[in-house]
Image (cartoon, rainbow, N blue to C red):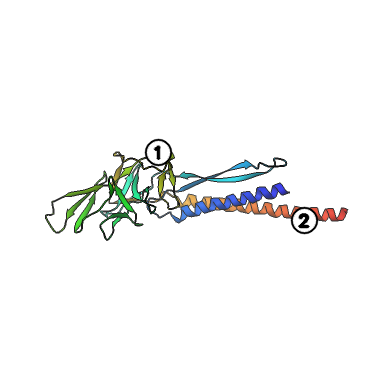
Amino acid sequence: MDRLIYLAMNGAKSALDQQAVLANNLANVSTTGFKAQLSASRALPVVGEGAKTRVFVVDTTVGADQSQGPILQTGRKLDIAVQGEGWIAVQGKDGREAYTRAGDLQLNANGLLQTRTGLNVLGESGPISVPPNNDVYIGADGTVSTIPTDAVPNAVNIVGRIKLVKPPARDLERGADGLFRLSSGQSAPADGSVQLATEAIEGSNVSMVAALVDMISQARLYETQVKLLQTAQDNSQKWSQMMSITA
């Protein structure tokens, strides 16, 4: 009886944890550049005194779905999307270099090129600053050029180049802020082979239908585990009644 309760309890907890991952993915189905979170679980035996009859479930986040989301044309000059493999380097709130696929960029009041969430986009020598009264153009290789609006319009100036990287997927880990970083804590080198689609953004790669189906599956699994707990309780009560009668 004790074994049944333990197994059902761990199964229900695992189903709830899986639901949390799926709910987060579903909540970000419209988030620019979002990569679906993947999770898995496995059974491990409980080590201790007594018979080795108990197991518990260990949930692990195995990473993210690195497949590319849909490229959406916006016509906006500051929108970029990474084509194929690669990442845009940004400065996280902790000051460390981090990586994102969200390319809906903007300029802040000081002329710094930032993500929509206010993170500085990194160039190959630091944050990229754009002088005032200039139109901004971003090339397919990440080059940021400006054309003054209050002077000769054909005077093109290059103010920086967005740092684009392509580290192996196995070396990346997702942080609590949704950004990716190298598990070694180091910064990835710039990779000239990464190309951008300009005036476009990458949509989320979360499949709403698949996420909803998985949520229904996990909900049914949770209900099954709860029924097992109820069965264990009923069996325990019946066993107590039988013991009372025989006594």
Give the amino acid at mark 1. Answer: Pro
Residue 244 position by quadrant: bottom right
Which residue is found at the position 65% from the left and 50% from the top?
Answer: 8
Of helix, strand and loop, which one carries label 2? helix
Q: Please, is residue 219 above or below residue 190 in the view?
A: below
Q: Nearer the viewer, mark 2 or mark 1?
A: 1
Q: Position of residue 215 (x, y in %)?
A: 53, 52
In this figure, which residue is indicated by the disc labeled 2?
A: 237
Give the amino acid at mark 2. Answer: Gln
Reading the chain from its start, which is encountered first: label 2 or label 1? 1
The quarter of the rendered structure image containing the C terminus is bottom right
Of helix, strand and loop, which one carries label 1? loop
Q: Is residue 207 visible?
A: yes
> Seen from this angle, which residue lies furthest bottom?
109
In front here: 100 or 15?
A: 100
Q: Position of residue 52 (x, y in %)?
A: 69, 40
Which residue is found at the position 25% from the left and 57% from the top?
Answer: 111
Dot 2 alpha-carbon crowd within 10 angstroms: few under 14, some 14 to 19, many 20 or more? few
Q: CA distance from mark 2 to mark 1?
A: 56 Å
Instruction: Report the side of 171 relative to 53 (left or right).
Output: left
Instruction: Report the side of 46 relative to 101 (left or right).
Output: right
Q: Is residue 212 visible?
A: no
> Seen from this angle, which residue lies furthest right?
247
Q: Position of residue 44 (x, y in %)?
A: 62, 41
Q: Position of residue 239 (x, y in %)?
A: 80, 52
In front here: 93 or 172?
A: 93
In this figure, which residue is indicated by the disc labeled 1?
A: 168
Is there CB contact under 8 Å for labels 2 and 1? no
Q: Which mark is residue 192?
A: none
In front here: 153 or 198?
A: 153
